[in-house]
Image (tube, rainbow, N blue to C red):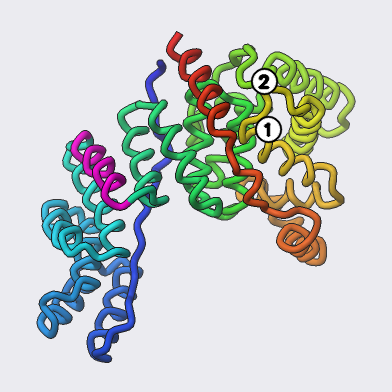
Amino acid sequence: MKKIYILLAFLIAFFSIATAEENPEIDRLLQEGIELHSAGEFQSAIEKYKEVLQIDPENISAIYEIALSYLALGNYENAIIYTTKVIYSLDRTLSVGAYAIQSEALAALDRTEEAIALLERALEIKGSKHLLHFNLALHYYKINDLDNTLLHVKKAINLDKSHAEAFLLYAYVLNDMELWVQSILAFQMFLLLEPDDPRARAAFGELLQTMRITSLDEDEARRPVLTNPPLTIINGINKFQIYNTIVATLQSLRENSEEENDLFWEFKSVNREIILLLNEKNDGSEDRTGIFWTFYVPFFTRIVESAHYETFARYISVSYFPESFEWWQEHPEDAELFVIWFEEGDIVYHDEYYEYNDEREEELEEETVQYNRE
């Protein structure tokens, strides 16, 4: 299994919460502390939270926020001390976040195995929580345990389908496991949810590489992608056919295009051909019943076959192509129609697409794991 080079800094998932307090002074101090933390003034935030503790020494919201600010300051030992207090408080909401904060502090102290053990224990105590699965996936990714990364990031997505970072991690681990066709669609899910995220440009750059539209550019913060991708058939996906479709589409475009190096046009065209080929092969046969076939392929097929595909392509590439950003500024009506259509129209983000055939899904995952081990 190849070594992972993480050129993209994933942010560990936490949450900050200001609960309504019976004491208005406590509520005011908590809110001021959270605003200071958001502005990057972490030490000042801690001072506000400690004022709360002078009024109410057991205020669990203040203790939690102190831990979060200590983590941001890089004061990991204190972050561990304060999160331990939250965990032992058994607060149903904040204790989950406290586990995540403490795990990150442990990992920052080169105690990643302890961080993983902590989160595994938290899952036993708290049950299946999106926050715990996602942070556990991140820690497994850091130690290059791709099988467990994939396991937990899929569980995180199943619990929260709107979490963009989970789709981004999913895309990277799929690519690292040489499941590059699935990775293409996962990258687009992230970009659809967060097109202007600070990491969107790097993600779109790797998407272009994965689709073989571009090669490694030393000036871009992207990881090298195999020039000749694995072309086996895994989980019903014939990568040989996909690769040939990419090559044929690019060759046709480059032979007939009057404009040189129009990467947007190439992306839009290659992506359409990939999705349409996958849809053609989506016949419901035994090896095509997993989530890739029941959710991702139908989801993107409806976009590709709609009147809004151009808008979609511009939307997810806005961080990469200046002309896409300009297009959005010049076509506000198209943008509005796309948003309305996406949120309320033909395409619906149905939960039933995420209903797994558990037995078959486990078989397909085991096939994938066995293939990568070989």
What residue appears at the point 73 percent right and 62 percent down from the top-left corner?
A: 339
Work out whether residue 17 or residue 350 is closer to the camera in this orientation and state it.
350
* Residue 24, percent from left and from top: 27, 91
42 w.r.t. 233: above or below: below
Quarter-wise, where is residue 345 in the image? bottom right
* Residue 135, percent from left and from top: 35, 45
Q: Mark 2 points at which residue?
A: 236
45 w.r.t. 2: above or below: below
Asked if marks 1 and 2 touch (Cβ < 8 Å), the reply is yes
Dominant SS type (magenta): helix
Quadrant for the N terminus in the image: top left
Amino acid type assigned to the residue bearing label 1 in the image: Trp
Work out whether residue 337 or residue 321 is closer to the camera in this orientation and state it.
337
Range covered by the magenta-colored residues: 113-126
Amino acid type assigned to the residue bearing label 2 in the image: Gly
How many numbered callouts?
Answer: 2
* Side of 109 where 320 appears, left or right: right
What residue appears at the point 48 percent right and 29 percent down from the top-left corner?
A: 223
Q: Name the residue under label 1.
A: 293
Q: Earlier in the sequence, mark 1 or mark 2?
A: 2
Extreme residue in the front direction: 359
Q: Which numbered marker is on residue 115?
A: none
* Residue 362, percent from left and from top: 51, 27
Q: Is residue 122 magenta?
A: yes
Q: Decide: few, some or many residues near mark 1? Use Cα within 10 Å; few <14, some 14-19, many ≥20.
A: many
* Side of 63 where 131 appears, left or right: right
Q: Decide: few, some or many residues near mark 2? Use Cα within 10 Å; few <14, some 14-19, many ≥20.
A: some
Extreme residue in the top direction: 374
> Helix or strand or loop: what does disc 1 sit on?
helix
